[in-house]
Amino acid sequence: MRRLIAAALVSAAMAGPALAQGQPPLRCAVDGTFAPHAFPNLQGGVQGFQIDLFREVARRMGREIVIDSAAFSGLIPALNAGRYDFLCAPTTVTRERAEALLFTEGYIWTELQFGIRRGTAPIRSEEDLRGKTISVNKGTPYEQWVNNNRERLNLTLLAFDSQADAAQAVIQGRAYANLSGNTVVRFSASRNPQYVADFVLPGSRLHWGTPFRRDSGAMRNQVEDILTCMKRDGFIARISERWFGDRPGPDQAENIEFPGYGPPDMPGYDPTPQNPRCG
């Protein structure tokens, strides 16, 4: 994992539950170049949807939290090595990952979307990608999709340590399209007129959840209970609107309480009914 590029120590004592006595700060990590989920602010730390979300999770747990920033490709190995309690980075729940990690239920839907340079003909189907170079962030399902379809569509992969660099490759003409999550592509398009949010891969909707080690079931369930309370009182919907520009509807994951613990129908799912103490 590359050198940590930023760290934020957040006090949870400003409001809500008293700090848990004698407990060390929670430790988690994000990709600090993945705007608007986590990206640098002018004060030298990181800001974004994930930062707001997990500061509030920690506050409701009565804990302090340290949020490190590093390349996404190194985050899961660091989690498994015990460096972090969980990851604050938005992490797509795939079956392969769920066989090795425990996840909370999704708090946002993610879909795979392409960004293209303004003036490029719109992508209407996967066939329009044939023979093209696709840029991605390393260690992500976006890289996996390109690799899985490389031979079928004669794709060339251009992988970067940050999503910002992957998007810039499209603007510079080094890649035909950039593949990433829908929220990130839309945000990049809102900030750069030369970058356009384009084709969404059909059937690619998945949970963005919080990963834990397999031995952290109790903490996974505790964090998921808090996320459920944050759905009930509208906190996740409010910060979603702040960072992504649209108020999520009742059919969006920001507002859906999924049964049990973890994404249903995935390895690691616990069907025990939730009964969080909210308020």
Image (spheres, helix red, strand yellow):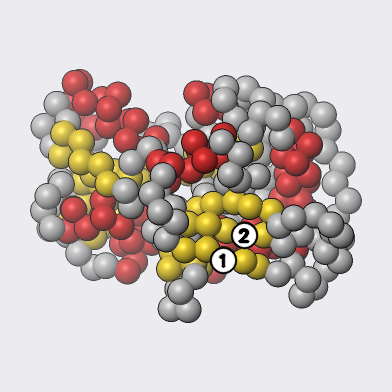
Q: Which residue is mark 2?
A: 66
Q: Amino acid at mark 2?
A: Val
* Residue 5 visible from this viewpoint: yes
- In the rendered image, which quarter contains the C terminus? bottom right
Looking at the rendered structure, the secondary structure element under dot 1 is: strand
Q: Which mark is residue 245?
A: none
Does residue 251 appear to the left or right of 232 in the view shown? left
Does residue 207 appear to the left or right of 134 in the view shown? right
**Residue 142 on image: x %, y %:** 35, 38
Q: Quadrant of residue 119?
A: bottom left
Q: Amino acid at mark 1?
A: Ala
Q: Quadrant of residue 264?
A: top right
* Residue 58 visible from this viewpoint: no
In the depicted view, which residue is nearer to us: 238 or 28? 28
- The residue under the point 41% across, 44% down is 1
Mark 2 closeness class: few <14, some 14–19, many ≥20 residues within 10 Å: many
Does residue 94 appear to the left or right of 84 in the view shown? left
Looking at the rendered structure, the secondary structure element under dot 2 is: strand
- The residue under the point 30% across, 24% down is 148
**Residue 208 on image: x %, y %:** 54, 43
Q: Which mark is residue 8?
A: 1
